[in-house]
């Protein structure tokens, strides 16, 4: 929790999705609600990100886009494409978003038989619920407030009506960046118990190493630290895959080059992917 009333990085990610959706000629996803849901944050974001700079100054603007857009944009494309395929096979699926932040997918998706569960810290979740109400959006998600320091995820989901007999799609985007490996693996161990038909997506970054070839990721880490949300030291890719396989998951591991090729190349302003960010799709069925 920061002095800025909840997660600043969640607001930045929403801003990135909004910018991409408006600037891309043929966006792979269209988060037309993101701009509305961060309306109250405009001054805050401009002050934090663009402080003492002119927003349209070419070099600086390009630097901001290269720093803040690649991860939220690429993982949104990844998640929305994968869910589309999951839904084709499982038309009565549940979609569980851990660390939901200001995600708007539940309100943009028109499926009638899908149940959306959003898990987040109670403080920030209350902010989001108020914004959803202010925008007069229908109730499309079941909000599950969870403080991981004191609450049981499984118990809270059960209380909220989560059905373990239904196929379940889970995203945990951006969460691993702030947890040590053992804590994150423990979370995955709990998630594994949710359903016998389960797909989990998440991203992580390689522990500080030579893979951060241009130093951009360290710059991003410095920014989040200044915002009061310091990142962990990252994970070893081999350890992530091994840990998931030991939990009984079938693992698809997308490395930075594959992410660049599948989700970044050809997008706005020749967006440049990070050299140390990885995606995981883990399946239990």
Image: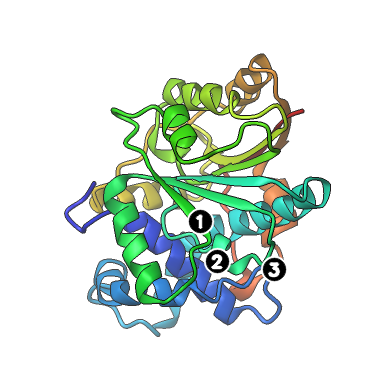
Q: Nearer the viewer, residue 191 or 91?
A: 91
Question: At x 64% / y 65%, what residue is drawn?
Answer: 109
Whole-angstrom CA distance, mark 1 to mark 3, is 23 Å
Q: Secondary structure at mark 3?
A: loop
Seen in the image, is 59 located left or right of residue 72?
A: left
Residue 88 at least partly seen: yes
Image: 195 above or below 37: above
Image: 273 above or below 86: below
Q: Which residue is mark 2?
A: 107
Q: How far from the left and from the top, in percent, is residue 95?
A: 61, 47
Give the mark nearest the N terminus, 1 or 3.
Answer: 3
Q: Are marks 2 and 1 in contact (CB under 8 Å)?
A: yes
Q: Nearer the viewer, residue 214 or 54?
A: 54
Q: Secondary structure at mark 2?
A: helix
Please tell me how crowded label 3 is: few (under 14), some (14-19), or many (20+) other residues with Cα within 10 Å.
some
Q: Which residue is mark 3?
A: 28
Q: Are marks 2 and 3 in contact (CB under 8 Å)?
A: no
């Amino acid at each position: 929790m920061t002095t800025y009333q909840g997660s600043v990085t969640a607001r930045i990610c929403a801003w990135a999705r909004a910018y991409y959706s408006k600037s891309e000629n043929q966006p792979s996803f269209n988060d037309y609600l993101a701009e509305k849901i961060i309306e109250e944050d405009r001054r805050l974001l401009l002050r934090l990100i663009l402080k003492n700079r002119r927003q349209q100054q070419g070099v600086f603007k390009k630097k901001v886009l290269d720093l803040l857009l690649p991860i939220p944009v690429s993982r949104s494309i990844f998640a929305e494409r994968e869910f589309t395929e999951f839904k084709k096979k499982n038309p009565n699926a549940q979609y569980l978003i851990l660390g939901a932040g200001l995600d708007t997918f539940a309100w943009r998706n028109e499926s009638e038989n899908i149940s959306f569960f959003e898990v987040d810290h109670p403080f920030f979740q209350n902010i989001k619920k108020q914004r959803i109400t202010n925008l007069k959006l229908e109730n499309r998600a079941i909000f599950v407030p969870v403080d991981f320091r004191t609450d049981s995820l499984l118990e809270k989901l059960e209380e909220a009506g989560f059905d373990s007999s239904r196929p379940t799609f889970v995203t945990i985007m951006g969460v691993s960046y702030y947890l040590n490996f053992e804590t994150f693996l423990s979370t995955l161990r709990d998630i594994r118990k949710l359903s016998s038909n389960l797909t989990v997506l998440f991203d992580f970054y390689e522990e500080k190493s030579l893979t951060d070839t241009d130093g951009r990721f360290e710059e991003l880490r410095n920014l989040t630290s200044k915002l009061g949300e310091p990142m962990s030291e990252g994970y070893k890719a081999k350890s992530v895959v091994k840990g998931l396989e030991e939990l009984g998951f079938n693992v698809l591991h997308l490395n930075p080059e594959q992410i660049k090729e599948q989700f970044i190349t050809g997008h706005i302003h020749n967006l440049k992917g990070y050299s140390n960010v990885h995606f995981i799709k883990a399946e239990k069925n």
